[in-house]
Amino acid sequence: MQVGYGGRDLGDKNPFTPKAYVARYWDQHVRNNLPKPSFLLSKASPMSASDTASFAKLAAANKLSTRLPEFCSAAHLLCFPEVRPSLEKHTEDAGFQTYNDGQNFTNYGTDFAGGIDTFKNYSNEISTTPVNDFRRYSRGAAGHEERFSAYASDSNVADQSFSTYGTNAAGGSGEFKNYSSNSNVPDLRFTTYSDSTGGRTQSFSSYSENGNAGGQTFQSYGKNSAGAANDFSAYGTGSNVASSDFTNYGKGGAGPNNTFTNYGVNMNNPTETFQSYADGTVGGTQSFSNYRDQANVGADSFKSYAKSTSGSEADFKSYGNSFNPGSDTFKGYAKGAEDSKVGFTTYSANTNATFKDYAKQGVSFASYNVSFSPGRASKTVSGSLVKRWVEPGKFFRESMLKDGTLMPMPDIRDKMPKRSFLPRSILTKLPFSSSKVHELKRLFKVSDNSSMEKMIMDSLGECERVPSMGETKRCVGSIEDMIDFSTSVLGRNVAVWTTENVNGSNKNVMVGRVKGMNGGKVTQSVSCHQSLFPYMLYYCHSVPKVRVYQADLLDPESKAKINHGVAICHLDTTAWSPTHGAFIALGSGPGRIEVCHWIFENDLTWTIAD
């Protein structure tokens, strides 16, 4: 809701601070007597006047990176700590019960013979950014075991990297349980994982389940190994818009046994890439069971799968039984294989599959293009799958907004890392475009292929995207820029709104008194959503043909008011995708229904003031 304070209540009497300047800017550009929106102005830079002037001078001289830690601290930004190589060499087994330090392991367990390392509760439940790097972990070990339990679970924007893990090891095993489950925007990287091993076993149980966005990368996994066994159980189950990249997986191995069970099941819009998978292997088996079962759209690519193998076996069981068709591409599938057996069992027609340049012999398709009943899918989707893909209450119809309605409230809590806007005096001196990403990376000391690099590129891509039909958009990194954009669309008599608090999240709530803004008439608004960036960045866009509502939210038992919600109803959904989560949850399709949703914590909507 619109909550305000006057210019004298800023908590800082110095008129030259960024917060004081923003309050004056509001008075100059907004033409009404409504209170200033405290929830918005509280996101102004917390820097002092002297720090602002000092860092603005450094930014103008392109020297801000020389004082990056001080700048990040003073400006309240998201900056990753530098992970420096550790000269410490661990020569004995170790047991970590609770590890949160965010450092790296260099020369850890090198040339170990036997023994066990255990990591329990490793970087779990970290609201800030856990950054960990394992370098030369268990390299050259013989018969050594590593066990990771509850690794980086429930973390936020985790950056976890394993380099040369178990390379040249003989025997032994590596086990990961509950790896990064329930995490928000994780970036998980394995480089040279278990290459050139002999008789080593690697297992991942519950890998990246129920995660939100982010990505996992495996490069050179199990390459040139003999008698290796790799097992992924419940990989990415129930995750949202996640990506996985496997390169050189099991390439050149002898007698491997690689198993993926429940891969990408119930995922929403997954992107999975397998390149040079098991190419050149001799003997052994590759197996995928329940691949992408009941997933929603997405894209999968297998390039050079089981190419030039000899005496190997590759099998896909129950492939592509998706709810909404995805896009699947197989190139060079089993091409050049000799005496190998490659098969698809129960391959669903409910996918847009392309097979190019695959072996004409030795490949069997059993029950290919099995019909997939939309009616059966609709029944299933009305229950558990909708809950996985679309949180109950995230979307609802306008008719629900009336006194006495009982409805589920989604988790409206802000899961983004806490940050502040930058003062315009600094922001205008910083690069902000994909063409200058190298300057941005130098400024914030961002490593190549890191989660910070991906985060920056994704945000820049969204900001530079061509507007959709009828859309006016702008990304803003200062409150002044947000005021300018909103008033340019709506005029100067504006108000900004958000839901009052997060009470009722993940529970049923009762709708109390409802008020339609601007008399409940169809109107235009400007909605602003956070983007993941080092400083506070919002993607703001004009939203035509909407109605905006305020509603008291009550406890269903006591009928006591627990929240004051702001909801926006989109009346024209013709340009929305048929696979949009709103249609999965509510049924129907583009242009056939209106769709409403609550304004989540720290998201905003601007309207013409009543």
Image: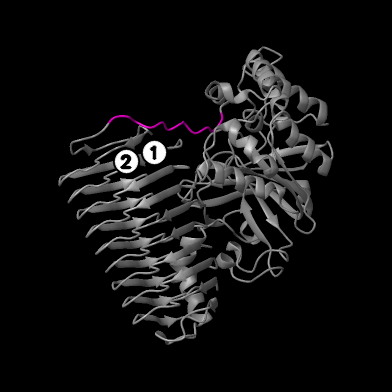
Q: In the rendered view, tell whether residue 287 sits above or below residue 488.
A: below
Where residue 552 appears, as percent x and y from the top left, is 60, 45
Q: Nearer the viewer, residue 7 or 88?
A: 88
Distance between mark 1 and mark 2 Cα atoms: 10 Å
- How crowded is the residue under tag 2: few (<14 C-alpha within 10 Å), some, or many (20+)? many
Q: Is residue 420 above or below residue 303?
A: above
Q: Is residue 207 visible?
A: yes
Q: Is residue 256 left or right of residue 39?
A: left
**At which x and y percent is residue 157?**
48, 42
The relative height of residue 285 versus residue 163 in the rendered view (above or below) is: below
Q: Residue at x 66, y 50 (%)?
A: 462
Which of the 4 quarters of the picture holds residue 251?
Answer: bottom left
Q: Which residue is mark 1?
A: 132
Left or right, 548 with reference to 131: right
Task: Using the image, tell me which numbered label, if any, was put on residue 122.
Answer: 2
Mark 1 vs mark 2, foreground winner is 1
Of 120 and 115, the residue lying toward us: 115
Q: Any magenta on residue 407?
A: no
Q: Whole-percent x and y of residue 301?
A: 51, 67
Q: Are marks 1 and 2 in contact (CB under 8 Å)?
A: yes
What amino acid type should be assigned to the residue bearing mark 2? Tyr
Q: Secondary structure at mark 2?
A: strand
- Magenta segment, prevailing SS (helix, strand or loop): loop
Dividing the picture into quadrants, the one containing residue 237 is: bottom left
Q: Categorize mark 1 by other alpha carbons within 10 Å: few (<14), some (14-19), many (20+).
A: many
Position of 526 with respect to 12 (left or right) is right
Part of the protein shown in magenta: 77-88
> Disc 1 on helix, strand or loop?
strand
